[in-house]
Amino acid sequence: MFNSGEVVLANIQFTDSFEVKKRPCVVLFEEFGNVVVAGITSNKDMHGIPLTIKEGAIKDSVIKTNYIFTTTESFIEKKLFSLNKEKKQILYENLLGKIIKLK
């Protein structure tokens, strides 16, 4: 079982190909073995929420709130670290802002 705010290493299948790659991502929520995550990239030119080495990332990175997908527990290899309370709040406020914009 994975908890909200955990950064994990997961095998992700990209939507534009059959290729599967190991990628870090942050767990948004888990239910019935399905894990909804946001992708993380080390490409700091991407739009998203900054994630630093000080916070636990291997490299300074970006949480891509425009890259949300569902995977399964079996595709997650391991937990890397957890976001602190402040970063989780920023993440969820950002996601909520996107939802509110849609209305």
Image (cartoon, rainbow, N blue to C red):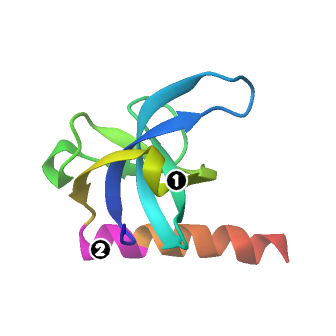
Task: Tell me if I can see residue 16 in this picture.
Answer: yes
In the rendered image, the vertical position of residue 57 relative to residue 30, given as above or below: above
Tell me the element at label 2: helix
**Residue 9 falls in which quadrant of the image?**
top left
Q: Tell me the magenta residue range.
A: 84-89
In the rendered image, the vertical position of residue 67 relative to residue 84, given as above or below: above
Give the mark nearer the N terminus: 1 vs 2: 1
**Residue 26 falls in which quadrant of the image?**
bottom left
In the visual, does 74 lie left or right of 61? right
Mark 1 and mark 2: Cα distance apart in space: 17 Å
In the visual, does 97 lie left or right of 100? left
**Residue 82 falls in which quadrant of the image?**
bottom left
Q: Magenta stretch mostly in which secondary structure?
A: helix
Mark sitting on residue 38: 1
Please state the horizontal and vertical placement of residue 72, each as a whole percent of the image.
53, 54
In the visual, does 66 lie left or right of 80? right
Q: Nearer the viewer, mark 1 or mark 2?
A: 1
Kind of residue indicated by mark 2: Glu
In the rendered image, the vertical position of residue 16 relative to residue 89, given as above or below: above
Circle 1 packing at 10 Å, graded few (<14), some (14-19), many (20+), is many
Q: Are marks 1 and 2 in contact (CB under 8 Å)?
A: no
Is 39 inside the magenta-drawn segment?
no
Kind of residue indicated by mark 1: Ala
Query: Label 2 belongs to which residue?
Result: 86
Residue at left offset 61%, top offset 34%: 13
Residue at left offset 19%, top offset 54%: 55
Tell me the element at label 1: strand
Circle 2 packing at 10 Å, graded few (<14), some (14-19), many (20+), is few
